[in-house]
Image (tube, grey):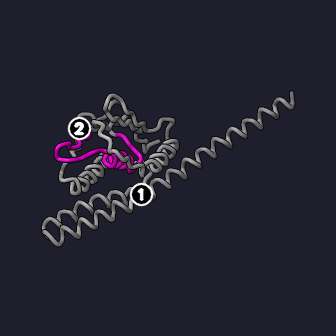
């Protein structure tokens, strides 16, 4: 009986230790994910700014505002665990504005505002990362513009578009998406999913209820 109790106690300690380790690992992944800044995107933004400055100073001023809005939101949220979904979608809109400067306004990003009255939280940079994944792997042209729809159903954010893969796919976001999924495990058993079905690319992103400050 004594050894049975001792065994149970030791097993419980091991299980608690494993759970704490998993939580710590997820927390490390969360910090690693949030600390990343895309150097390719920054370089491309600066190159575009140089071109605009030489061509049209007024256009360059507008572009500086776009760059500032986007990177300010990224840097402001760098040390924030969860942010309001509305703020995340504002960052996404700024990101699409940058992408349209390189894609001749051939990207349309629509957000269904009907369900946004309810407050949700999300890991910062999540929507931006999946938009980057979609854009980098899609054929975009005046003949084939890219239309991306974003809507909420329950506590899930859906990003949806027609699937038009490039011949040579870009897998640069694969590692970052893997890191994001590990970071999600710090908060939930559910992780984002990428679903490819019947010519539609659907991304499902779990959302979080805001934590009451009174608790």
Whether residue 143 is in magenta: the answer is yes
1 or 2: tag closer to the N-terminus: 1
| Number of marks present in the image shown | 2
Instruction: Find out whether the residues at labels 1 and 2 contact each other: C-beta distance under 8 Å.
Output: no
| The quadrant where residue 112 appears | top left
Give the magenta part as a residue range. Answer: 120-148
Please tell me which residue is depicted at 29% across the width and 49% down the height of the picture.
92
Q: Report the side of 21 relative to 48 (left or right).
A: right
Q: Residue at x 50, y 55 (%)?
A: 32
Question: Which residue occupies the foreground of this view, 144 or 156?
Answer: 144
Q: Position of residue 118 (x, y in %)?
A: 31, 36
Instruction: Provide the residue designation for mark 1.
Output: 78
Q: Is residue 195 visible?
A: yes
Question: Is the residue 76 above or below the residue 55 in the image?
Answer: above
Q: Residue furthest front?
A: 167
Q: Residues within 10 Å of mark 2 (few under 14, many from 20)?
A: few
Question: Residue 119 at x, y = what percent?
Answer: 33, 39
Viewer-proximal residue among 212 and 135: 135
Residue highlighted by disc 2: 113
Q: Is residue 197 magenta?
A: no
Residue 140 in the image, given as x and y percentages of width and height: 24, 46
Viewer-side residue, 136 vs 73: 136
> Residue at left 34%, top 44%?
167
């Amino acid at each position: 009986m004594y050894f049975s109790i001792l065994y149970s106690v030791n097993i419980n300690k091991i299980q608690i230790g494993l759970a704490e380790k998993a939580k710590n690992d997820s927390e490390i992944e969360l910090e690693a994910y949030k600390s990343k800044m895309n150097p390719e995107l920054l370089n491309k933004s600066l190159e575009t700014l140089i071109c605009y400055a030489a061509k049209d100073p007024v256009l360059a001023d507008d572009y500086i505002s776009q760059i500032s809005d986007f990177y300010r939101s990224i840097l402001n949220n760098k040390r924030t665990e969860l942010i309001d979904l509305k703020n995340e979608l504002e960052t996404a809109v700024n990101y699409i504005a940058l992408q349209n400067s390189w894609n001749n306004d051939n990207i349309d990003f629509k957000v269904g505002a009907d369900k946004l009255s309810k407050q949700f939280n999300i890991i910062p940079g999540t929507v931006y990362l999946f938009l980057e994944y979609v854009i980098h792997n899609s054929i975009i042209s005046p003949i084939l513009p890219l239309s991306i729809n974003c809507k909420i159903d329950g506590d899930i954010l859906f990003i949806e578009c027609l699937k038009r893969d490039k011949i040579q796919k870009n897998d640069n976001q694969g590692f970052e998406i893997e890191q994001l999924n590990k970071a999600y495990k710090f908060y939930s058993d559910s992780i984002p999913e990428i679903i490819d079905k019947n010519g539609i690319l659907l991304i499902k992103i779990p959302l979080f209820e805001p934590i009451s400050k009174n608790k």
